[in-house]
Amino acid sequence: MARVTLNGEVAQFSLKCEINPLEWDPRYGKAIGKTTAAQKLNGLLDNLRASIIQHYREISDREATVTAEKVKNAFLGLQTQNEMLLDLFNRHNQGLEAQIGKCIRLDTYQKYVRTAKRLEEFMKYKYNISDISLKEINHSFICDFDIYLKTVHSCSQNTAVKFMQHFKSIILIAKNNGWIHSDPYSNYKLRLVKSEREYLTEQELENIMKKKFTIKRLEQVRDIFIFSCFTGLAYIDVYNLRKSNIRNTFDDSLWIIGKRIKTNVTYRVPLLDIPGIIIEKYSGTIPEDQVLPVISNQKMNSYLKEIADACGIDKNLSFHVARHTFATTVTLSKGVSIESVSKMLGHTNIRTTQIYARITDNKIKNDMVALADKIKDLETSFALNG
């Protein structure tokens, strides 16, 4: 008989081997003597021990918990191959990769790849395993991963939620395929916190526009950033902007018309003088169909921080701040309706636009001054009656 003992748990099974009790040493678990039969049996037993230990190590490497029963079943060939988390995640990501440029964007694929990498790092860090059976993922695993993201990787609440959402998508696939029967996310709430989005005030925007840069790369980045401040285009849409997107419309004026790369929703923005001047500035200096000399988003954001320092702006300046500045400082604060702003930003929901647009103190002041003019007659009547 073989006995596997692990953490106080015992699993026994027959090895289908027989020996005369008088030729057996129970203390050492081996046959007595140096006969051919004894040596053959002892060699077989050593191989069986090594095999059991190997099964233990394999289970320990891929699963969070190892039990004596699991080791026994693995040795006897009774275990069923469980679906593993990273195996499923990687198959899912391969499917996304094949659809890039069709119905999947590259950055969507990259987000899932990053989530799989974080999960792999987490399992090594927390449990010292390379993968885990889907059936072993529970509420505790979910919570531990959330804590790991916020502590080891210093993720904000909203960033951690994005990782957890991508992970949840994989869990849903596993549940729909019957590989797990209970949802470990059932008592876990994904909570995004409302965050204030940065935007430039009119004075800050003017400071950047007036700044003279002796370094050409900073001047180009500043120009492209200002272009976005007066068009509301996101980085990827400016990057993909072509001359065919600039068209004459019903009023015989130039508009920028296209579809947002992120959502495939159409945007339509009248071309103001400032972005028009920037387009003209780079005309003929870049490939024929390209509108602006856009570099990578990473370099763009790095140079924007240099620009913020040079202009005395104490804000975390990134390219996306331009989109918020367009919604808040350039349009809404100047009396443009939120419905028009929403259409120009390519939003399908006003609530999305409200995330970008902030009512500034100047806007409130101007609105109340206009209201005061409209109710002046009422104020006069009230004063006379008093």
Image (cartoon, rainbow, N blue to C red):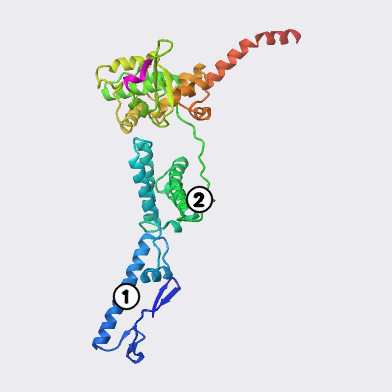
Task: List the residue tagged with mark 2.
Answer: 185
Return the x and y of residue 221 as percentages of the image width and height: 32, 24
Secondary structure of residue under mark 1 = helix
Return the x and y of residue 59 as percentages of the image width and height: 37, 64
Mark 2 or mark 1: which comes first in sequence?
1
What number of labels is visible?
2
The numbered dot on residue 48 is 1
Vertical side of 334 occupied by 178: above or below: below
The stretch in magenta equals: 242-247
Mark 1: few/some/many CA within 10 Å (<14, 14-19, 20+)? some
Secondary structure of residue under mark 2 = loop
- If the image is split into quadrants, where does the N terminus sit? bottom left
Label 2 is placed on what type of residue? Tyr
Instruction: Answer yes or no: is residue 200 visible.
Output: no
Mark 2: few/some/many CA within 10 Å (<14, 14-19, 20+)? some
The numbered dot on residue 198 is none
> Mark 2 to mark 1: distance in Å?
41 Å
Vertical side of 10 occupied by 325: above or below: above
Q: Residue furthest right?
A: 385
